[in-house]
């Protein structure tokens, strides 16, 4: 029997090479006269946003740009972006870039319109709205933020906090594979592994809202990502591989937006917050070790996923053995892609592990979804295994 569930996603999705350069056509119902674009300095240095901006200006829109977004964006940066949008009289918000830019854009659209206190919006379902029209354009294939109702920012020195609300789902998500052509190998690898983690954790989530739609999307996402990640990393201008990665990332985002992620992310967040390790790499560092911990209760579930990424594992009959091999092969894949595979490789020592474990316990909204209950000592042992 199929239990009750809800499924939310972005209102409209466009997948098209060159779509960003004709954004004025795709987004006409949402833009208004004074769109506000949120991006980061790396995008500006590459000029990726220029065709989009020119199209908007040519269509008669008065555009302003906020380009200060950094990885793990801090609260103060979000506040500056909100004030800049208000000063511009923004009629819509366009997020253009990686997950951090899209997450900032979501909060700008929300707070600049509603005027609510961000401190009262943290958590699940606490945002009140309304928000400005929102268009999200990813330039990496990893976060799936263009189809998730989640924005994660850094509060204080290290703590990650999230706003989770259907209000943060955009009116339009634009997937333009051309924007990802030539993305550096390490970024492609880390963001690609991040998307795979989204699919894996969504599929196995203990959430009451784990549902057939999310599981179907997670499987298709893993199929696309697993078959194309090496091509995308080692042939960075392979248009077909780039398109498959972007689509896979989006499908994984749809899946975990409705059947939430769990302990891999909970243990990854302190690594990123404290040591400023990119989020996708943080996930990759702990992924195999969390899977092995969960195998005690989730081996059959992971055994279903294993052949989707590594088809030869279908020949392994034992669920337990197949699940263990799945974790080991994922660790090996990270190495093949050129990513660091141990915590010590990113400057973390054994003395740092107790604080990481304590900080991971703050991620209660994620830990509750893990297939196996995980406490602070369990987290410490996982970090030790990853060291």
Image: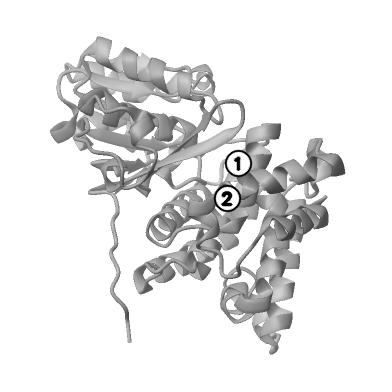
Q: In the picture shown, does residue 68 fall above or below 347?
A: above
Task: Give the residue pinned by disc 1.
Answer: 279
Q: In the picture shown, does residue 314 fall above or below 39?
A: below
Toward the viewer: 50 or 41?
Answer: 41
Q: Which residue lies most toward the bottom here?
A: 317
Colour scheme in use = one colour
Toward the viewer: 38 or 259?
Answer: 259
Q: Under tag 1, what secondary structure?
A: helix
Residue 323, picture quadrant: bottom right
Residue 207, picture quadrant: bottom left
Image side of residue 222 versus residue 189, left or right: left
Q: Which residue lies most toward the top here?
A: 87
Residue 245 shows up from this direction: yes
Residue 185 shows up from this direction: no
Q: Count neighbours of disc 1 (C-alpha within 10 A) and say few if under 14, some if 14 to 19, many if 20 or more.
A: many
Which percent across, then down, holds residue 5?
30, 69
Q: Which quarter of the rendering shows the N terminus?
A: bottom left
Which percent across, then down, holds residue 343?
79, 45
Image side of residue 140 versus residue 359, left or right: left
Q: Earlier in the sequence, mark 1 or mark 2?
A: 2
Toward the viewer: 151 or 10?
Answer: 151
Which percent across, then down, holds residue 10?
28, 49
Task: Give the residue pinned by disc 2.
Answer: 194
Q: Residue at x 43, y 70 (%)?
A: 215
Q: Residue at x 86, y 44 (%)?
A: 350
Mark 1 in CB contact with mark 2 (< 8 angstroms): yes
């Amino acid at each position: 029997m199929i239990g009750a569930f809800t499924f939310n996603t972005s209102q409209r999705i466009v997948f098209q090479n060159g779509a960003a350069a004709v954004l004025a056509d795709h987004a006409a119902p949402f833009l208004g006269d004074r769109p506000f674009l949120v991006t980061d300095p790396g995008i500006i240095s590459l000029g990726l946003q220029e065709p989009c901006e020119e199209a908007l200006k040519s269509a008669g829109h008065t555009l302003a740009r906020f380009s200060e977004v950094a990885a793990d964006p801090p609260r103060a940066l979000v506040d500056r972006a909100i004030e800049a949008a208000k000063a511009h009289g923004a009629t819509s918000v366009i997020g253009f870039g990686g997950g951090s830019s899209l997450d900032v854009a979501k909060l700008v659209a929300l707070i600049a319109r509603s005027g609510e206190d961000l401190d009262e919006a943290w958590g699940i379902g606490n945002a009140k709205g309304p928000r400005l029209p929102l268009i999200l354009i990813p330039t990496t294939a990893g976060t799936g933020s263009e189809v998730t109702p989640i924005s994660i920012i850094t509060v204080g020195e290290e703590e990650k906090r999230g706003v989770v609300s259907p209000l943060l789902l955009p009116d339009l998500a634009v997937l333009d594979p051309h924007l990802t052509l030539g993305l550096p190998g390490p970024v492609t690898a880390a963001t690609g592994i991040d998307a795979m983690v989204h699919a894996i954790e969504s599929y196995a989530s203990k959430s009451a809202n784990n549902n057939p739609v999310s599981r179907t999307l997670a499987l298709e996402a893993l199929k696309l990502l697993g078959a194309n990640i090496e091509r995308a990393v080692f042939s960075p201008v392979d248009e077909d591989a780039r398109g498959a990665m972007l689509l896979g990332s989006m499908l994984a985002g749809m899946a975990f937006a409705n059947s939430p992620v769990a302990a891999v992310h909970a243990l990854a967040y302190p690594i990123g917050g404290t040591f400023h390790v990119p989020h996708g790499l943080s996930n990759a560092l702990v992924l195999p070790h969390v899977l092995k911990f969960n195998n005690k209760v989730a081996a059959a579930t992971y055994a279903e996923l294993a052949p989707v990424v590594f088809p030869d594992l279908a020949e392994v009959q034992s669920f337990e053995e197949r699940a263990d091999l799945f974790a080991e092969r994922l660790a090996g894949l990270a190495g093949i892609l050129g990513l660091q595979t141990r915590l010590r490789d990113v400057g973390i020592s054994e003395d740092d592990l107790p604080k990481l474990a304590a900080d991971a316990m703050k991620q209660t909204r994620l830990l509750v979804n893990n297939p196996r209950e995980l406490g602070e000592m369990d987290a410490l042992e996982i970090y030790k295994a990853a060291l």
